[in-house]
Image (cartoon, coloured by chain):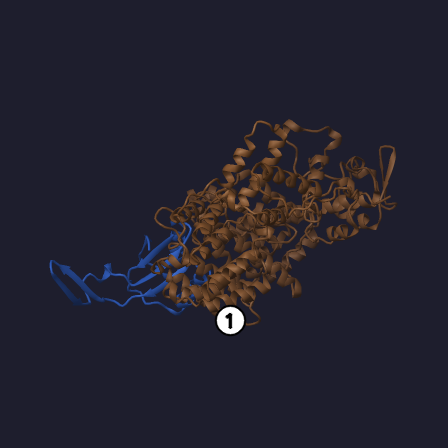
Chain colours: A brown, B blue
Amino acid sequence: MIDAVWKLESARIVAGLTRMVHDVGLAEELAQDALVAALEQWPESGIPDNPGAWLTAIAKRRAVDHIRRSQRLERKHEQLAYELDQQRDPERDDVLRLMFISCHPALPTEARVALTLRLLGGLTAEEIARAFLVSEQRIIQRIAGAKRTLAEERVPFELPDGSELAERLSSVLEVIYLIFNEGYSATSGDDLMRPGLCLEALRLGRMLAELAPHEAEVHGLVALMEIQSSRSAARTGPSGEPVQLHEQNRGRWDQLLIRRGFTAMLRAREVGGTPGPYVLQAAIAVCHAQARTAEDTDWAQIAALYEALARLLPTPIVQLNRAVAVGMAHGPQEGLALVDSLIADPALRDYHLLPGVRGDLLVRLGRHAEARLEFERGASLARNVAERAFLRRRADEITVTGSPGATLGQAARDFLARDDLDAVTIRSYGQTLRRMCLTLGEHMPLASLTADQVARVFATAWDEAAAKTWNRHRSAVRSFGAWASMDLATGLDRRAETRPRAETIGSAQLDALWSRPDLPLRERTLWRLLHESAAAVTAVLSLNVEHLDLDDRRARAGDAWVSWRSGTARLLPHLLAGRTRGPLFLADRRPGPSRMPAAADLCPDTGRGRLSYERAEYLFKQATKSLDPAGGGYTLRQLKPRA
Amino acid sequence: MRYLMTTKPTDAAPDEKLYAEMAAFIEEMTAAGVLLATGGLEPGGIRVTSFGDTITVTDGPFAEAKEAVAGFALVEVRSKEEAIELTRRFRAIVGDGESVIQQVFGP
């Protein structure tokens, strides 16, 4: 019972407290204190008449106590009195601010999702963990990390305005839709849907629509989610298998939710403006909802909407959906042409719906043998059990006449089972052939394999890879072709390996790195310092706060000096945030008792250990993956400027 | 999950304050997506009974009016506890009387 009250009230309580104490983490702790008080008192005293107000009052009392204890007593009091005065209606704005903070771009996406469910949805870490099939510990860490980042970055508790508003709002919408989609089409696990998450996302969306009523995209998102949810009962069959939209029993669509979706859509239209991506997607959903039977669907309209959407959001998945709509509106041949233009897109390389859609179109064109291969390939790519079974069934439904002969998969296995290859070669060749089976389908008849298809696999899989990697895969294919007496590598040129990997990072990449808005402060400072000082990574990581000479922009590391320029100098005071001693770069967490480092590597104030080389290197690699043409990410050593 | 909350009629006449509080409550719950549908029901109504092959239609009012339903609310909630909490809030506004909450299965 207390849990139910908490879930209904926590967003408002935490939001109000954040306004008072200017720290989300602290606000949530205070709110939790109030919850604990409720757990102690309510079983004896009974639930108060207005439990929400009771929790708020207790939490605010704690907040005032806390502020009183803190040093800046006078100023805070004045501020508090002023803010309590202002507290009449801004409650709604507080919740909106809390949403913006939880979805702040300084946080990684996963942390935004966890923090939003936690602070706005009132879910426990355990509930979030269960919904996302990860350990509770991971969620606790994600939330703690997010709160720390917000505190370190001093993210203000305010409503963004102007151009920033649009950007920040889209981040909030993205988080909500991500939660919805994780519930609606679970990317992993055994069930196709986790309805709890859909409901949470709907709640958040409806809440946002009340808080920001003048944003068409918010209403668009709500409409989209309402209409998609309306189909949830119809989109799985009796044994949990997915039922495609055109085969769904429309009588099982929830008319209440459809009506809510239409209402939200009308509100979006009232706001006006050029339709954004959510409004367009909602408009497509409305088209489907309005069709009384699948045959009544206005595919021409849907294809036109997808075309508009693809202009705003040219993602491969939108293009794929557009191809489906075009296939319905203008015939399978046109749809197939669009799908085929997507095959080379690396983003769709392992996306199981691409072969699924292609298979559908091929069936309609009467090309059954090819369709079967596509469904089989789709099944081998699908990660969700229900979807995999569905694609498998579609493949099995097609009976192909004639003897198929050896398949690619069987040939690959026979090839690798030869006894004249050493283990290293088998492993290396195995990687190449596995990728070919995954991309082309292992049931594909070996006889129909062409050099063009092999070249396409290479283009999507390894075009960006290092020349050495490309050549390794190329020799695997040549060897396989020689064994099978087929010419498979004609489309593959050997790549020159002479150019050594650049020792330093190019200035364009560096500029891109520095201009990233979402870099944590610690990383940003460390990387700047390494770049500006050209010092050894170990020396920089060994720096202590007491070694720093901020005025002269240098620090002593052992018997050498590390000196920096303005970029680092601007960041250092923020990183220090009042610390006067201990390691300059700290680890994210306090060390466990079994891995307690030497006292010199511990911060005497926070108890956190020194940032390790391995961790720093890992973070840098991860962060620079997208910048590195070879795709592996850079090493910290490469930050040193060219001599 | 969905719950249907039904409320039995009372003798007390609603006043201005109750109307205002109720309107605010309904608006808040509707906006939050919790309240899917709500309405009041005419007293009495029409009774349709079947027995064997015979179907009888009788116009109200009926003697056992106290057992009838005067209003309903269909809510979408996370748990039974949430449904109870919402009904508590509703009862706190309307004053003396009785409501029944039942989970709705299907469709």
Any part of residue B53 in sight = yes
Camera-side residue of A356 and A641 = A356
- Position of residue A531 in the picture relative to residue A335 (left or right): right
Residue A444 % position (x, y): 49, 45
Taking A389 as reference, is A425 left or right?
right
Subunit of label 1: A
Q: Which residue is mark 1?
A: A269
Q: Is residue A523 left or right of residue A450?
A: right
> Badge 1: few (under 14), some or many (20 or more) residues near its Cα, within 10 Å?
some
Identify the amino acid type marked 1.
Arg
Measured along the vertical axis of the image, is residue A424 above or below residue A441? above
Q: Position of residue A179 (x, y in %)?
A: 52, 52
Q: Residue A598, relative to residue A467: is it above or below?
A: above
Give x and y (percent) for residue A260. 43, 64
Closer to us: A53 or A502: A502
Q: Residue A79 occupies which quadrant of the picture?
A: bottom right
Q: Callout 1: helix, strand or loop? A: helix
